[in-house]
Amino acid sequence: MESFNETLDEYVERFAFIEALSREFIGMRGCGVYALLSPSTVDQLFNKYLELGVSVRTFARQFAMKMV
C-alpha cells in the first residue's frame, strides 16, 4: 500500500506543478505551457523542480520569465 500512496503523492505533486506552470505561462504569454513545450520537456522540468527544492510557484515563475 505504501507504493500506491507514493505514486498518488507524486501524481498530485506533478499535477500541481503543471497547473502552476501553465498559470504562469497563461499570465505572461497568453497560452498554456503545452502550447510551447512538449510533454517530455514538461516532465524534465518537473524533475528539475524536484531537485531544486523550491516552491512550485517560484520555479514556474522563474522558468516562465526565461521563456518571455
Image: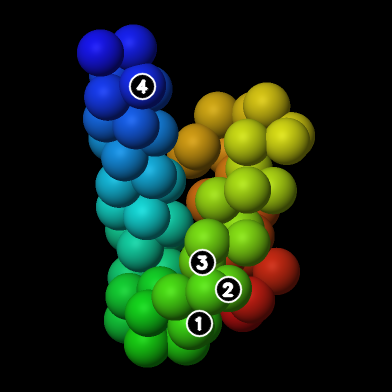
Question: Height in image: 17 above or below 65?
Answer: above
Amino acid under disc 3? Val
The residue at which mark 4 appears reads as 3
Pair 2/1: label in front: 2
Q: Residue at x 63, y 48 (%)?
A: 47
Question: Sequence-wise, which precedes: disc 2 or disc 4?
Answer: 4
Q: Are discs 3 and 1 less than 8 Å apart at CB? A: yes
Name the disc covering residue 42, or none. 3
The residue at which mark 1 appears reads as 37
Q: Residue at x 68, y 27 (%)?
A: 53
Pair 2/4: label in front: 4
Q: Are discs 2 and 1 less than 8 Å apart at CB? A: yes
Amino acid under disc 1? Leu
Q: Are discs 2 and 3 less than 8 Å apart at CB? A: yes
Residue with the most extreme bottom position = 35
The residue at which mark 2 appears reads as 41
Amino acid under disc 4? Ser
